[in-house]
Image: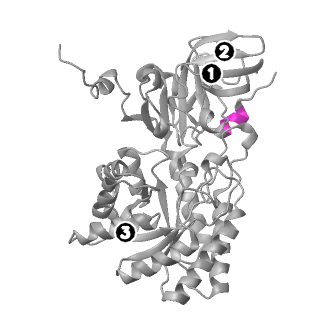
Amino acid sequence: MQNIAPKRLDLFPISAKIEKTGTSNSLSIAGCNLASLAEEYGTPLYLYDRETLDRNVSEYMSALEVYYPGESGISYAGKAFLCTAIVQWTQIHRLWLDCSSDVEIAIALAGKAPESNILLHGVNKSPLDLQWGMQSAGTLVVDHLTELNQIIDIQRQSDEAMPDLWLRLRPGVSVDTHTSIQTGQTDSKFGMGVSEALELVGLCLEQRLPLTGVHFHLGSHFHDPSPLSSALDIVLDFIREAFIQTGWLPKYLSPGGGWGVAYHENDLPQPSITEYIQYIATHLVNGCQERDIPLPKLQIEPGRSLVARAGVALYRVGAVKTTLNRRWILVDGGMADNPRPALYGARYSALPVNKPERPTTGLAWIGGRFCESGDILISDLPMPEIAPGELLAIPASGAYQISMSSNYNGALRPAVLWLEDGQARLIQARERSEDLLRRDLPLTML
């Protein structure tokens, strides 16, 4: 038996504490008692800690200022988690917003992001995506030749100024992560090879399009930055060749994002944002010097490493079962609000909200409420004795959970709270059955 709370607390937001509440101890975040929040807002419940978000941005900005002598900027990846409140927070820090659809652009505009701070990505943008991107984004990242021709056709029918265009390259380099979230390998569906990119540079210049940047992305949730060196070499060689052939040089270079975070105590310590930026900046500076090309503006695109640790998922235990080889702790959420364990085998940790320092009594499997055997949030995790009605807090829940949530089994998406200075603010209301039924139409009117 051991007290696992001190180590697991390092997975939680930086404001998380174990505080004395009455006759026992209880988890709090940003001075807000989690049990009280669950009582007021219900469960499942998602919490976001502003202090952690602010510190992560600060670490990125400081590292760029120290290690990159050229201009630099940060884009927040909306696919990690996006709502109008998050957009408003990004604009406090003057971040760009990486959007992947017309709806994400609409959310960005609702949060008062200026068009100049909106980028549109996407491997197969719809005509509506492209129209929104052309009208309301400052930068549009081109994925392939067909898309560029669509952009040219739209522009011919418009008198409005075009957004800047970037080309998305596929370097043919993999990072060490789950195969489902690798994006830069040779057979990836994303981006274009060097020869096609050179062709598109020529077409952009011929059509007098505002081509200003190059983008690539190797994958999500990796911890070793070394593959970025070979990818940067390939992209810088492309830039050098494009300059020789056409005289064109990009103003911007974005090596994407994807830097990982700690989800489980075995992943600790938290991966260093500063070391990640130092690695990219050093290699980019040296690579540009070796090729005699000017430093571009470095645009970093973190999503997970900005927001994952800031988020916590709160569940209530409905039942505890014992089978032949497992102790099951069944909670009122699961794969409908967090599909990552089922999709990628993602491994999380957890603490009970009340008396989190209780010693463990053996392994537990934390299962969800949905009709799938794969609906297991956490497997073989040392846990104390847990009773029905207790609350469990799962850290590192801020990225790719709510944004990938579903209505499977009629699940309603959870409420989301913003925690700051002892105050909790509702930033997304809990979905209601009326919200789902509003979309339904009867076959006949009876």
Q: In this rendered view, identify the residue nearer to me: 11 or 25.
A: 11
Residue drawn at 45 percent across, 81 percent down:
202
Left or right, residue 419 beside residue 28: left
Magenta span: helix, strand or loop, mainly?
A: helix
CA distance separating discs 1 and 2: 22 Å
Residue underneath mark 1: 373
Q: Is residue 7 part of the magenta span, yes or no? A: yes
Dot 3 amino acid type:
Asn
Q: Earlier in the sequence, mark 2 or mark 3?
A: 3
Percent position of residue 274, x then y: 65, 61
> Can you identify the residue that label 2 sits on?
386
Q: Return the residue nearer the eye: 383 or 134.
A: 134
Q: Secondary structure at mark 3?
A: helix
Mark nearer the N terminus (3 vs 1): 3
Q: Outermost residue toward the right?
A: 1
Whole-percent x, y for residue 170 in the image: 58, 65
- Where the N terminus falls, by quadrant? top right
Residue 337 is labelled as none
Q: Amino acid at mark 2?
A: Ile
Residue 328 shows in this picture: yes
- Depicted 249 relative to depicted 436: above or below: below
Whole-number angstrom distance, CA of label 2 to CA of label 3 = 59 Å
Residue 395 appearing in the image: no
Find the magenta span and give its range: 6-10
- First along the sequence among labels 1 and 2: 1
Residue at which label 3 appears? 149
Instruction: Residue 316: give x, y in percent of width and height.
Output: 54, 19
Any magenta on residue 316?
no
Q: Residue at the spot x=55%, y=30% of the render?
A: 28
Query: Where residue 314 sits: x, y (%)?
Result: 53, 27
Q: Quadrant of residue 414?
A: top left
Three-letter amino acid code of the residue under disc 1: Ser
